Amino acid sequence: MENPAAPSLPDAVRGHWAERWAPAYLKPYLRLARIERPIGWWLLLLPCWWSAALAAIAAGQPWPNPVHCLLFLIGAVAMRGAGCTYNDIVDRDLDTRVERTRQRPLPSGQVSLKGALVFLALQGLAGLLVLLQFNGFAIATGFASLGIVALYPFMKRFFWMPQIVLGLAFAWGALMGWAAAFGSMSWPAVLLYLGSIAWVVGYDTIYALQDIEDDEIAGIKSSARFFGERVKLGVGLCYALTVLFMSAAFAKAGAGPLSYAGLALFALHLGWQVARIDRGDGAGALRLFRSNRDAGLILFAAMVLDCLV
């Protein structure tokens, strides 16, 4: 470790506790896990919570299993950190060519490759301990996602839509809540998963607008570059598919009016994002990307209310 006091990255939350209070020797590792950027674990967690709520609706339960929801929270933080660490290990050379990423702990020398590998193993162990609290089918479902997670960092080198692979991984929680509740898989969860994939592709296309110029120089492929001037149309189509698949999931699970009302508010939020997209405004793209946490929480709250009613 060469520079534990290096400044936080441009898209980090200003004044985050990890930057203000964490010991200097831990800060580079917390940055490696993106702790100071909590939006990532929120976006990984929300499909898990949606799935748990959808399972509760289908089963006629008054609320999603609170123990499952807590375990998903812990697991999302651990596995998002592990995924980011793995991604940075794979991308440590590419990251030096992009303005926003060249100060990450590995390319900037704040963390050694050996230290990153040890840290990855510790986070993976934490995620495993969480996964083992579920039933056997849910455990197997969780393990099935690892191949996609391992593949994702390499896709941007040759696939114009790496966000699809990211979606396959980041939306996996839409299957996990149902698997944890029922010990099996069914169409409502599959449809929710498909909708969540489209959601991930949409919001990560917005996120990728921050790097579009540097990505062109470095030869990194992304959906933002693929859509080009038609990025609003591309994101709009992704979000339309999100709402379509989620509506089908609600219908299959027997959801009530409150769930559909929440989905309508969710859809309005997504439409607002599309209307505000500006290819030349990287800071605005980051704000729109982060706003998906609020959109997802609105939908989850409506589903929980549906359970109660």
Image: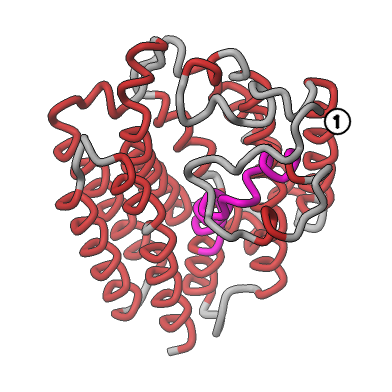
Q: Amino acid at mark 1?
A: Val
Q: Main secondary structure of the magenta part?
A: helix
Residue 174 seen in the figure: no
Residue 207: quarter of image? top left
Residue 130: quarter of image? bottom right
Q: Residue 169 at x, y = what percent? A: 54, 37
Label 1 environment density (alpha carbons within 10 Å; few <14, some 14–19, many ≥20): few
Quarter of the image for the C terminus: give it.
bottom left
Considering depth in this image, is 134 or 19 the residue closer to the camera? 19
Residue 247: quarter of image? bottom left
Quarter of the image for the N terminus: give it.
top right
Which residue lies under the disc numbered 1? 118
Numbered range of the magenta stretch: 28-49
Q: Residue 29 at x, y = what percent? A: 75, 40
Left-right relation of 31 to 304: right
Residue 134 seen in the figure: yes
Give the SS element for disc 1.
Answer: helix
Looking at the picture, does residue 305 appear above or below residue 274? below
Query: How many marks do you count on the picture?
Result: 1
Answer whether residue 39 is magenta in the image.
yes
Q: In the image, what residue occupies the spot 43% across and 83% down?
A: 305
Answer whether residue 74 is magenta in the image.
no
Left-right relation of 48 to 272: right
Q: In the image, what residue occupies the spot 63% across and 26% down?
A: 88
Q: Residue 202 at x, y = what percent? A: 31, 42
Q: In the image, what residue occupies the spot 35% across and 74% down?
A: 259
Looking at the picture, does residue 229 appear above or below residue 43? above
Q: Residue 118 at x, y = what percent? A: 86, 30
Considering depth in this image, is 47 or 176 the residue closer to the camera? 47
